[in-house]
Image: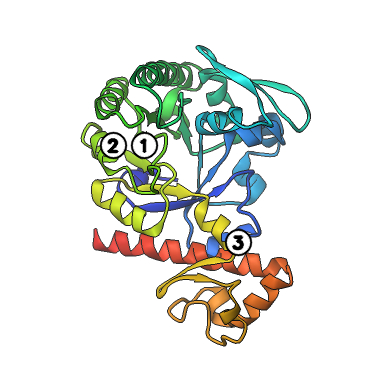
Amino acid sequence: MNLDILKTKYLFMPDATRGAVRYLTTKQLEETKTEALVTNTLHLLIHPGPDVIQKLGGIKKMMNWKGIVFTDSGGFQLFSLLHSKKWKGQVHENGATFLSPKEGNTYELTPETSIDIQMKMGSDVLVTLDDCRDAKISKKEASQSVERTVKWAKRCKEHFEKEYGGSEKTGKLLTCVVQGANYLDLRKECAKELVNIGFDGYNFGGYVVDEEGELVVDEMETVIENIPKDTIRYAMGVGKPEDILKASKIGYNLFDTVLVTRNARHGTVYTSEGTLRIKNKDMALDSRPVDPNCKCECCKNYSRAYIHHMFKSKEATALTLLTIHNLTYYQNLIASINSDN
């Protein structure tokens, strides 16, 4: 598989958190024209575990997925989970130690083990472990985050090359995460330090929207201005259709978010005529397709009224059809960006 297209082509990657896009078969996912997806290192570490995945031939064989697989490093999830009431653990200089609330086991995630886990999973594109923190932290804390992120990224690359032979031998790509919270000088510093180490891609890390839900354009531009243009430029967590358009104009070419599938499961649908809420009462007698301009399985075969009925009746098929539609909408959006560029 030629992964060089990831450095030039625009792609939207749905989140297959536990090795699956919820409510879809792999064939249904392929039919949405999805070419790449993102799996979650942290959750797959807990279950079924990287050793099990490796014994079963890797995540792609498990899923019967022929496309590209990204794995995140677990940094963002660690930050989110360790600040929840259910999870216990701590981030330290060597990585993070945490206790799973499900079976009570203790796990340690370091730069080296993060690479090992991703290699056992068999992903095509790996991400270095980063120190992700809240966007509203002090500059001192943000500086500490940058320092640790750079150190961990260097350790990841050294381990990747020493133990596996690096990108040249494995055919896989290694990307890193640019941190710095909302401090432009720290974003610049982090990007430059990571470029000096050298990676196949540079990912915008942390929070991509502010408290008002607006894209943090200044921070994203600062990162783009300080990374090579012939590498992967991944806007992690972007996002809403309008944010993808903004980020692509800034210079990013890869995007992912749980929003597109999560919203489908809650009855919020993206269409060429605007956002549609299938749970609303006015959908009950609407015989039109979800999107008259869409040719996905949902829109070709079923009315808004029927999907509304199934949704209200808690029929899982409604969630499947709306997820198919939302992903198709996003992939059509990405196709239009590629054609314009």
- 161, 35: nearer the viewer: 35
Q: Is residue 90 left or right of residue 11?
A: right
Q: Quadrant of residue 266?
A: bottom right
Determine the CA span between mark 1 and mark 3: 28 Å
- The local secondary structure at tag 1 comes to strand
Residue 96 in view in this figure: no
Q: Is residue 30 above or below residue 106?
A: below
Residue 159 in view in this figure: yes
Residue 204: image tag = 1
Residue 219: image tag = 2
Indicate the amino acid at tag 1.
Answer: Phe
- 338, 152: nearer the viewer: 152
| Residue 6 spot, x, y in % from top left | 37, 45
Determine the CA span between mark 2 and mark 1: 9 Å
- 295, 261: nearer the viewer: 261
Pair 2/1: label in front = 2
Residue marked by disc 3: 266
Q: Residues within 10 Å of mark 3 (few under 14, many from 20)?
A: some
The residue positioned 46% from the left and 28% from the top of the image is 132
Residue at the extreme left of the image, as rendered: 225
Pair 1/3: label in front = 3
